[in-house]
Amino acid sequence: MRESTITMSQACGGLVRYKSVVGLSPNTIHNYRYSFSKLLACFSDDPLFTAITEQQLVGFFAYLPGTAW
């Protein structure tokens, strides 16, 4: 089986397009785009989606101010 060649920006863009097609509100789509722009800003390049580590994602969520989970 081949490793995926989808980049993080492609994965984020695909999810936004999918969520738009299934009928989420424009405000929700805006929030997805905003959140993904913050996520992508945490990387100096556009890494392969499969190369993102759990540690990197934990670091991203810790970076977000005022996030309550």
Image (cartoon, grey):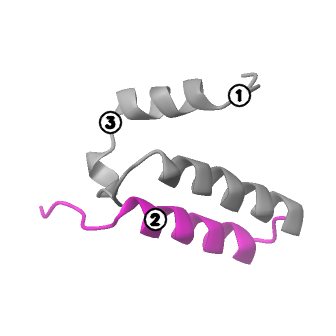
Tag 1 or tag 2, which sits nearer the N-term? 2
Q: Find out whether the residues at labels 3 and 2 contact each other: C-beta distance under 8 Å.
A: no
Check if residue 5 falls in the magenta segment. yes
The amino acid sitting under disc 1 is: Pro
Instruction: Tell me the residue at 77%/55% (across/down).
Output: 31
Inspect this view and state whether residue 38 appears. yes
Please, which residue is most extreme toward the front here?
44
The residues colored magenta run 1-25
Q: Which residue is mark 2?
A: 9
Decide: few, some or many residues near mark 3? Use Cα within 10 Å; few <14, some 14-19, many ≥20. few
Judging depth in this view, the residue of 62 and 12 nearest the camera is 62
The amino acid type, in three-letter code, at marker 3 is Thr
**Residue shown at the point (60%, 57%) measured from the top left:** 37
- Pinpoint residue 16: horizontal percent, then vertical percent: 64, 67
Which residue is identified by label 1?
65
Q: Which residue is labeled 3 in the image?
A: 53
Element class at badge 2: helix
Residue 69 against residue 50 in the figure, above or below:
above
Q: Amino acid at mark 2?
A: Ser
The mark that comes first in sequence, 3 or 2, is 2
Relative horizontal placement of residue 51, taking residue 30 as reference (left or right) = left
Position of 42 relative to 6 (above/below): above
Q: CA distance from mark 2 to mark 1?
A: 22 Å
